[in-house]
Each structure stands twice: as structure tokens, then as C-alpha cells.
Image (cartoon, helix red, strand yellow):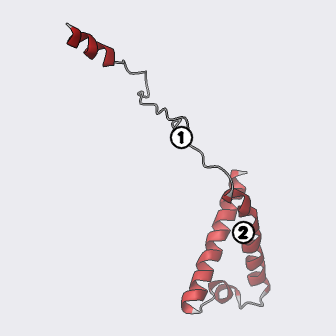
């Protein structure tokens, strides 16, 4: 499924760049590369970009993945090899003495 997302995202980016070029410079890159707007391959690319846009709609409403347990408010500050010691109690005991 991740591969399908990447392909859809790539096609959406191609479509966005093409629409940006059309809007800014009145230049259709897909039509230029593939033989005009009515050429078969250009129409295939336009159709794939449109399909990728439709397939990308659910990703807009997908919740963002949170790393390091930030959704619960607890960050993991441990090292990659072992848990670190809690020195907060040691400092409190030293102050009491």
C-alpha cells in the first residue's frame, strides 16, 4: 500500500507542477513532452494524474502519526542502549543532608 501512496503522490506532484506552469506561463509541459493535448499518451498522463488525485483524497483525512509517544505527552529520553538513571532523587537526598 505504501508503494501505491508514493506513486499517487508522484503523479499529484507532476499534475501540480503542470498546473503551476499553465497558470504562470501558459505552458503545458505534459502536452509539450507527449505531442499535444489530444495525443493519446498525454491523455493517459492526464487521466493518471486525475486518478491519483482521487486516490489521494482519503490521505487528507488520515490522522497524522505521532512519534515518541507525543500524543500522550510522554517523550522517551532514554538512550538507544539502556534506560538512563533517574538522578532527580539523588539531588533531593543530597539537599536534605
* 15 displayed left or right of 40: left
Task: Say which residue label 2 marks.
Answer: 53
* 1 displayed left or right of 63: right
Residue at (42, 27) in percent of width and height: 78
Task: Place residue 25 in its image quadrant.
Answer: bottom right
Other residues around mark 2 within 10 Å, as few (<14) / some (14–19) / many (≥20):
some
Q: Position of residue 74 (x, y in %)?
A: 49, 32
Other residues around mark 1 within 10 Å, as few (<14) / some (14–19) / many (≥20):
few
Residue at (19, 7) in percent of width and height: 97
What is the residue that sits farthest to the front in this orientation? 96
- Indicate the secondary structure of the residue bearing disc 2: helix
* 47 displayed left or right of 31: right
**Which residue occupies the foreground of this view, 23 or 97?**
97
Q: Could you give the CA–CA distance between mark 1 and mark 2, rounded to whole angstroms? A: 27 Å
**Which residue occupies the foreground of this view, 57 or 21?**
57
**Which residue occupies the foreground of this view, 41 or 10?**
10
Task: Place residue 32 in its image quadrant.
Answer: bottom right
Q: Give the mark, 1 or 2, whose residue is nearer the N terminus.
A: 2
Task: Say which residue label 1 marks.
Answer: 67
Residue 88: image tag: none
Q: Position of residue 51 (x, y in %)?
A: 77, 69
Task: Place residue 71 in its image quadrant.
Answer: top right
Residue at (66, 83) in percent of width and height: 30
- Indicate the secondary structure of the residue bearing disc 1: loop
What is the residue that sits farthest to the top in this orientation? 97
Q: Position of residue 6 (x, y in %)?
A: 65, 59
Verify CB contact (< 8 Å) between mark 1 and mark 2. no
Asked if residue 46 is positioned above or below residue 74 in the image, the reply reads below
Residue at (69, 56) in percent of width and height: 61
Q: Position of residue 86 (x, y in %)?
A: 36, 18
Amino acid at each position: 500500500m505504501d508503494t501505491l501512496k508514493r506513486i499517487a503522490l508522484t503523479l499529484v506532484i507532476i499534475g501540480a507542477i503542470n498546473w503551476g506552469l499553465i497558470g504562470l506561463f501558459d505552458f503545458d509541459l505534459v502536452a509539450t513532452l507527449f505531442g499535444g493535448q489530444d495525443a493519446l499518451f498525454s491523455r493517459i498522463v492526464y487521466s493518471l494524474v486525475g486518478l491519483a488525485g482521487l486516490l489521494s483524497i482519503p490521505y487528507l483525512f488520515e490522522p497524522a502519526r505521532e512519534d515518541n509517544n507525543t500524543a500522550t505527552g510522554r517523550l522517551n529520553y532514554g538512550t538507544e542502549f539502556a534506560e538512563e538513571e533517574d538522578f532527580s532523587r539523588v539531588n533531593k537526598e543530597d539537599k536534605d543532608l
